[in-house]
Image: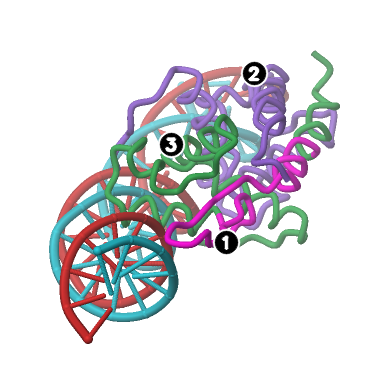
Chain colours: A purple, B green, C cyan, D red
Amino acid sequence: MKPIAQTDDEAKTVALLRAIAHPARFRIVKLLAARDTCVCGDLVDALPLAQSTVSEHLKVLKDAGIIRGTIAGPNTCYCLEPAALAWLEHEFGALGSACCGV
Amino acid sequence: MKPIAQTDDEAKTVALLRAIAHPARFRIVKLLAARDTCVCGDLVDALPLAQSTVSEHLKVLKDAGIIRGTIAGPNTCYCLEPAALAWLEHEFGALGSACCGV
DNA sequence: GCAGAGTATCGTATATTTCCGATGGACAAG
DNA sequence: CTTGTCCATCGGAAATATACGATACTCTGC
């Protein structure tokens, strides 16, 4: 793939979007937003995917900065990173302002 | 890829996200948002990509419903579809509300 | 120390995406 | 009618993403 010259902000936004733009990962984000409890094993039960696959998706989301992982004794607890969602909301707000005179 | 059972809203949102979650396409959306003029050939000049590649990206964005293409004589004019951006902004707003009690 | 539950990582097969050059179609000018 | 411009589509090559099973790791409780 050709990276294309882009600003840091663009790169950051695209990275966040790529992380969420996947059915399984978007579902994970929605699950985390819905339940207050940031359970991890429950995600494996909630998704029709293998445990290793879910774990990798969580890794992608964590690397992108969308979720945060905390080790809570025997299991790991994940929760959303509000700043990431706020950033995306802001980006879309900036885009929505202008359009070709509709 | 395994599609995962999902609602229509989820599918719609993910489809929109997948369309924008690419450096070249995100750049295109930003260019269209910045300039009022929805020129098409200028996009090819603005991007370090072949004409055919840009055309395919535009097709993806159009299929996703993010942009609209209008034939204006010899050239084609593209502009943003405000409803799509509004939908995404709304989706993120719904997500941002909750988080694991930070 | 040992066993068990819960996660993370590795290696790999498959499917998809991305990009390009070449080709084809539509339109305007001469 | 011929030419040139602009855009869309085709076919294929290369890179990437996705999902899985197997395996290694961490912490708890006995």
Q: Chain of mark 3?
A: B
Q: Secondary structure at mark 1?
A: helix
Q: Which residue is mark 1?
A: B63
| Circle 1/circle 3 CB separation < 8 Å | no
Q: Residues within 10 Å of mark 1 (few under 14, many from 20)?
A: some
Extreme residue in the top direction: B102
> What is the three-letter code of the residue carrying label 2?
Thr
Depth-wise, is mark 2 or mark 3 nearer the camera?
3
Q: Is residue A75 visible?
A: no
Q: Is residue B68 magenta?
A: yes
Q: Which residue is mark 3?
A: B23
Which residues, given as a range, are shown in magenta? B62-90
Quarter of the image holding residue C9?
Answer: top left
Q: Which residue is mark 2?
A: A70
Q: Chain of mark 2?
A: A
Q: Secondary structure at mark 3?
A: helix
In this orientation, which residue lies closer to the viewer: B80 or B66? B80
Q: Is residue B78 magenta?
A: yes
Q: CA distance from mark 2 to mark 3?
A: 31 Å
| Circle 2/circle 3 CB separation < 8 Å | no
